[in-house]
Image (cartoon, helix red, strand yellow):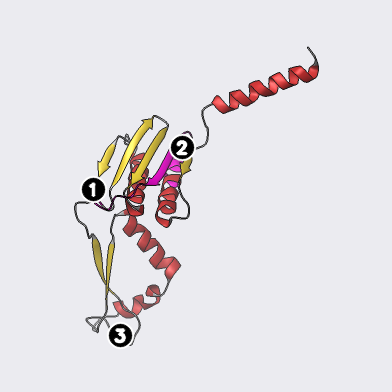
Amino acid sequence: VSHVSMNKQLLAVLVVTLALAPSTDAQIAHDSKIPQLAFAAQELKSALKETGRKNLRVSLAVRPDRSSPESFRIKVVNRDHLEVTGTDANGAMYGGIEVAEFLKLGLPVEDVSRNPLLKKRGIKMNIPWDCRTPSYCDKGSAAQNNTVHIWDFEGFWKPYFDDLARYRYNVVSFWSTH
């Protein structure tokens, strides 16, 4: 047997071994062009890093179904592979967030289908836009002290909206004096 032939055989064995070996890196398959799926993928990456799960594969997908908006299904394909399917992008995001929460809490992820109990889940916020639009009560300084934060997108609004998504809110109502 020539050295060239032996090297080719060793290379073939190595390729087959690598192809059949279980993955050592967690994988999250999703369409990164869909913001909700990108957000869920980030939550999953954080949970996987926090828990040290290196061999889990999670796929996030949307299978449109207008009859049940914001719903999702989690399917355990096997110990190292989960499929999360939403009826829309929000549903897939909520399913991904749920998987991330279960991982962080050390809870088993099981097959489940969920539909929102309420169509609209949200919060009302009184906004102190600036000193020209006073709060509902001008006896205190809370509105004036918080005006600077209202205009801070990266420091206030982005984390706030991320938390609202984590809590499965889908409505925000802003109020100010009219």
Residue drawn 33% across the image and 41% down it: 102
How crowded pointer 3 is (Cα within 10 Å; few <14, some 14-19, many 20+) is rated as: some
Mark 1 or mark 2: which comes first in sequence? 2
Residue drawn 32% across the image and 59% down it: 164
Instruction: Please state which amino acid type lies under the numbered disc 2.
Output: Gly
Residue to which mark 2 is pinned? 52
Specify whether 4 is left or right of 176.
right
Residue drawn 45% across the image and 66% down it: 154
Residue to which mark 1 is pinned? 115
Q: In which quarter of the image is residue 144?
A: bottom left
How crowded pointer 2 is (Cα within 10 Å; few <14, some 14-19, many 20+) is rated as: few
Q: How far apart are labels 1 and 3 at the CA level?
A: 40 Å
Q: Is residue 62 magenta?
A: yes
* Secondary structure found at label 2: loop
Specify whether 117 is left or right of 78.
left
Instruction: Please state which amino acid type lies under the numbered disc 3.
Output: Thr
Relative vertical location of residue 35 with respect to residue 19 in this rendering, above or below: below
* Secondary structure found at label 3: loop
Residue to which mark 3 is pinned? 133
Residue 41: numbered disc: none
Image: magenta residue range = 46-68
- Location of the N terminus by quadrant is top right
Q: Residue furthest bottom?
A: 132
Relative vertical location of residue 62 with respect to residue 22 in this rendering, above or below: below
Labels 1 & 3 near each other (Cβ < 8 A): no
* Secondary structure found at label 1: loop
- Residue 145 visible here: yes
Instruction: Please state which amino acid type lies under the numbered disc 1.
Output: Asn
Residue 2 percent location from the top left of the image: 80, 15
Q: How far apart are labels 1 and 2 at the CA level?
A: 30 Å
Mark 3 or mark 2: which comes first in sequence? 2
Q: Quadrant of residue 111?
A: top left
